[in-house]
Image (cartoon, rainbow, N blue to C red):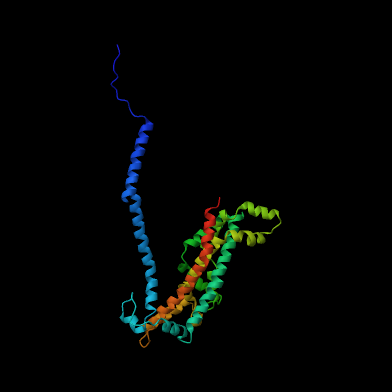
Amino acid sequence: MSTLDTRTTAPTVTEAVTTRGHRGAGRTRASRTTGRGPRARKSTLLLVVMVVITVYSLLPLFYLVVNATKSQDDLLSTFGLWFGNGFSLFQNIGETLTYNGGIYLRWLANTVLYVVVGAGGATLLATVAGYGMAKFRFPGRRAVFAIVLGAIAIPGTALAVPTFLLFSSVGLTNTPWAIILPSLISPFGMYLIWTYAIDAVPTEVIEAARMDGAGEFRIFFTIALRLLAPGVVTVLLFAVVATWNNYFLPLIMLSDPNLYPLTVGLNQWSAQAQGVSAHPIYNLVVTGSLLTIIPIVVAFLFLQRSWQSGLAAGSVKA
């Protein structure tokens, strides 16, 4: 006698996965249709954050541009984030370049000297040292690595006073060397080149060049330096910005106004208003600050192509 099997057949694993897949696809399509999914909310939040950061970053630049067009009276009597009654930009530029016998141009020349020699030398030394640390094995390499990391962790302002005492003992204070020599040391730049050269310069290429009879200096300047170009540009940008904006070290090292960089010189102009009989020149300070950032912007725009092309080349490297 046959009996009827009343048990319900359970769905197979494949059917369950297929059913869940269809349900998930339906929810995904619904989220894309309504635009209210987690990804949409995340993108909106990121957009708001980026807009806030952009406004926060561009607000000081907008303030400089707006107030550089004002006269001294308008600068003190009108709203800071909007234009004044007249347009005095070119007049302010002329007065800035000619005030006190054209001392601003002297400060600009000093800053360019410190940047070219100091930042350029720091980039060269960091590139050579970082490449050597990445591609050569020698005793004490781990100790050098620890020293470099320790030097990165120490802020530059903490070393300013010991550096002043050292340079004072050898008679180098109040000279350009008091600014140039400390700027030649860039532990962060060395570390950056070090980590970049490990993958950017293949060891096989170096060995092949050695087998062809090339010396170490020729390998570095003809092969390695080209492969390290994006890292070198990055280190150069960091060094240029750090040297151009250097304030505390020149402040304690220099006492001759003719040796001041732009940062210290403009601060001296700003401090003139604190005197009893001094004439405030805030319009010249603002205009001079605006002129000061133009070379940095030009440097970034000029080096941007090399920077981006190098990063793109590294992204598709096998």
Which residue is farthest right? 213
Residue 91 placement (x, y as % from top left): 42, 84
Residue 241 placement (x, y as % from top left): 48, 69
Residue 117 placement (x, y as % from top left): 56, 72
263 vs 2, nearest the viewer: 2
49 vs 261, nearest the viewer: 49
Which residue is farthest bottom? 277
Query: Does 152 sit above or below residue 297?
Result: above
240 vs 164, nearest the viewer: 240
Determine the residue positioned at 58% across, 57% down: 133
User: Image quarter for residue 221?
Assistant: bottom right
Residue 58 placement (x, y as % from top left): 39, 68
Which residue is farthest front? 33
* Number of numbered discs: 0
Determine the residue positioned at 33% across, 39% down: 23
User: Image quarter for residue 45?
Assistant: bottom left
Query: Does 13 sit above or below residue 156?
Result: above
Q: Is residue 229 visible?
A: yes
Determine the residue positioned at 57% across, 61% down: 229
Q: Is residue 165 left or right of residue 269?
A: right
Query: Does 13 sit above or below residue 27?
Result: above
Q: Is residue 12 left or right of residue 241?
A: left
Determine the residue positioned at 54% across, 71% down: 118
**Quadrant (top left/top right/bottom left/bottom right) for the N terminus:** top left
Query: Does 192 sit above or below residue 252?
Result: above
Q: Is residue 186 visible?
A: no
